[in-house]
Image: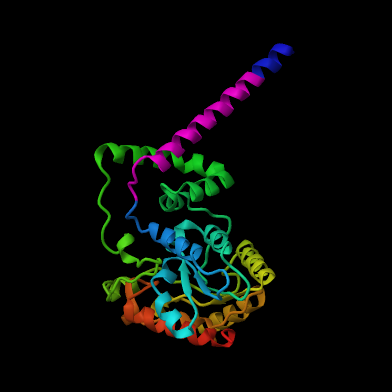
Amino acid sequence: MLKVIVFSAKLLACVVLGFLLVFASISVVWLYFPSCYEDSFQKGLLLQYRALEKSDPNERKIIVLGDSSMAFSVDSAQLSALTGLPCYTFGVHAGIGEEYIYEEASKFVREGDIVVAPFTNYSAGYYGTDLILFTTENEPELYFEYVLAHPLELFKRGSERAAVKFYYCLTGAPDVTGTYSLSSFDEVGNISLARKTIVSKAYSDAQAKTVYKPGFFSEETIAFVNDFYAECAEKGATFLLTSPPVYENNIGSTQEELEAFDAWARSVFDAPIICEKWSDGFVAYEDLYDGVRHLNSAGASAYTQNLYEDLLPYLT
């Protein structure tokens, strides 16, 4: 019996040591080898994070949360000029995961702040480790904060990512240019790229239709959003929801379904929904950039103006 116990203890020690070695190897490559992703689109989130980090804790501000549909549709510089308050966008890609965006943003929510989300259908509990790693590459504080909270996520995706980075360090990383690179953002992570429609109407019209009706958001997602609302309220901040931008021909709902969805959404979320009706976020083809949820510069300006008008009751 003693031999079995000793053997089991040694086996456990070897397994733990193996995990620690893998963890250390991934971390060394990801943090201390030369950056291969410094120009990636996900680094825009790092710019947004640093801008919030530098914000005045005693000054009221607006934070707009979301994914790429938000990033391509809300001009924080324009919103700041309209409201007279410092405004920040936080979020660049749906694949990063709702919980990570909200968890990181919550560090900067303070009394008097307004937090608003053009809300798309996220999956509660999902973390996009690949994209989070791109954001946290060569950023020890953010990296360890994430991987120590979610160690299994690192083991699922980190080994492959570290191997690819190691390969790029030996052979040279591919150049990252164009819209989906760091060059799209200004110094605070606002997408400043001037853009006109480049997606065809035929392609946009052919995309799978979104059907809004009661039950569209899962119970887990609703609970998560309501918990975030409670957290903001506890800090003395206001959390609001609004309809996200989407191409009007991408909607497959009947008018009755839309009306039922609107009433249902307002009943299940604790946060106020500030748009008059959910279809306020529907946009024409002329407002699109490169997809049914990304707006061109003119579309983003109009969406930001509408967001400002919906925020007016909360600005006093």
Give the magenta part as a residue range.
9-37
Looking at the rendering, which quadrant does residue 259 occupy? bottom right
| 175 relative to 233 in the view: left or right | left
Quadrant (top left/top right/bottom left/bottom right) for the N terminus: top right
Dominant secondary structure of the residues highlighted in magenta in the image: helix
Rendered location of residue 18, percent (x, y): 53, 27
Quadrant (top left/top right/bottom left/bottom right) for the C terminus: bottom right
Residue 43 sits above or below residue 270 on the image:
above
Rendered location of residue 275, percent (x, y): 53, 83
Magenta region includes residue 262: no
Q: Residue at x 41, y 48 (%)?
A: 137
Q: How did the renderer colour the structure?
A: rainbow
Looking at the rendering, which quadrant does residue 282 occupy? bottom left
| 81 relative to 311 in the view: left or right | left
Question: How many numbered marks does the figure carry?
Answer: 0
Q: Residue at x 63, y 75 (%)?
A: 271
Residue 285 makes an appearance in the image:
no
**In the image shown, does 130 or 55 lie closer to the viewer?**
55
Residue 47 sits above or below residue 64 on the image:
above
Rendered location of residue 95, percent (x, y): 45, 57
Residue 237 sits above or below residue 179 on the image:
below
